[in-house]
Image: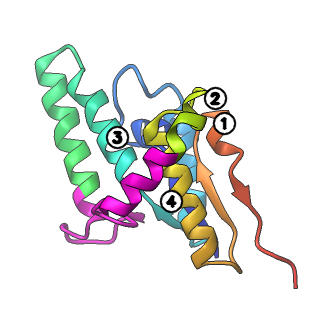
Amino acid sequence: MSIGLVDTSVFCEVVPVPGRSQHREAILGELELHVQHRVTLLVPVATILETGNHVAHIPAGTLRRDTATRFVRLVQGALGNLEGPAPWTVPQPLLAPEDLNSYLDRFPDYAMQGIGLGDLSIIAEYERQCQLHQARRVFIWSLDHHLSAYDRPAPQF
């Protein structure tokens, strides 16, 4: 079984967030395949916060409210707060001070590559999942090339 970290670019497609969901059908098809193959999907805190920011910037009030309501239900499902299974979960709901300090220590080098703090935290979670699950494939499910490149196959024994 594989572990996939869901990036903001993918979560915006699933919600969907107007203006940020041009590949919705393809992403929903891929989500269905991940569920069929029993991929463990994790929604990092950065994905939740960034997607929430995109939702809050939808210009039309009614559309913003409807999208926010869908978004909240998807996140609550990930947290286990709704009845029925969600296709994903949140790997670490709270950010520990030592994690933030670690991100900040690494941030200047990543910033020079054009990688923001949110993406850095997703990369750090990817690295953590690789350490925790050394016999499984771990990948970042993203439409952004710099994040989708993080894909460690399961070792062949």
Disc on the earlier residue, 2 or 1: 2
The residue that disc 4 covers is: 125
Give the answer, above or below, for where 44 lies relative to 61: below
Foreground tag (2 vs 1): 2
Disc on the earlier residue, 3 or 1: 3
Instruction: Look at the image and give the residue range highlighted in magenta.
Output: 76-105
Q: Amino acid at mark 1?
A: His
Disc on the earlier residue, 4 or 1: 4
Give the answer, above or below, for where 82 lies relative to 144: below
Closer to us: 2 or 107: 107
Disc on the earlier residue, 4 or 3: 3
77 displayed left or right of 47: left
The residue that disc 2 covers is: 113
Foreground tag (3 vs 1): 1
Magenta span contains residue 90: yes
Percent coordinates x, y for residue 41 in the rendering: 49, 63
The residue that disc 1 covers is: 146
118 displayed left or right of 111: left
Quadrant hosting residue 145: top right
Q: Amino acid at mark 2?
A: Gln
- What separation in Å lies between label 4 and label 1 (alpha carbons)? 15 Å
Q: Secondary structure at mark 4?
A: helix
Disc on the earlier residue, 3 or 2: 3
What residue is drawn where x is 57% and y is 48%? Answer: 29
Give the answer, above or below, for where 20 lies relative to 90: above
Foreground tag (4 vs 3): 4
Which quarter of the rendering shows the C terminus?
A: bottom right
What residue is drawn where x is 20% and y is 48%? Answer: 72
Q: Amino acid at mark 3?
A: Val
Q: Secondary structure at mark 2?
A: loop
Disc on the earlier residue, 4 or 2: 2
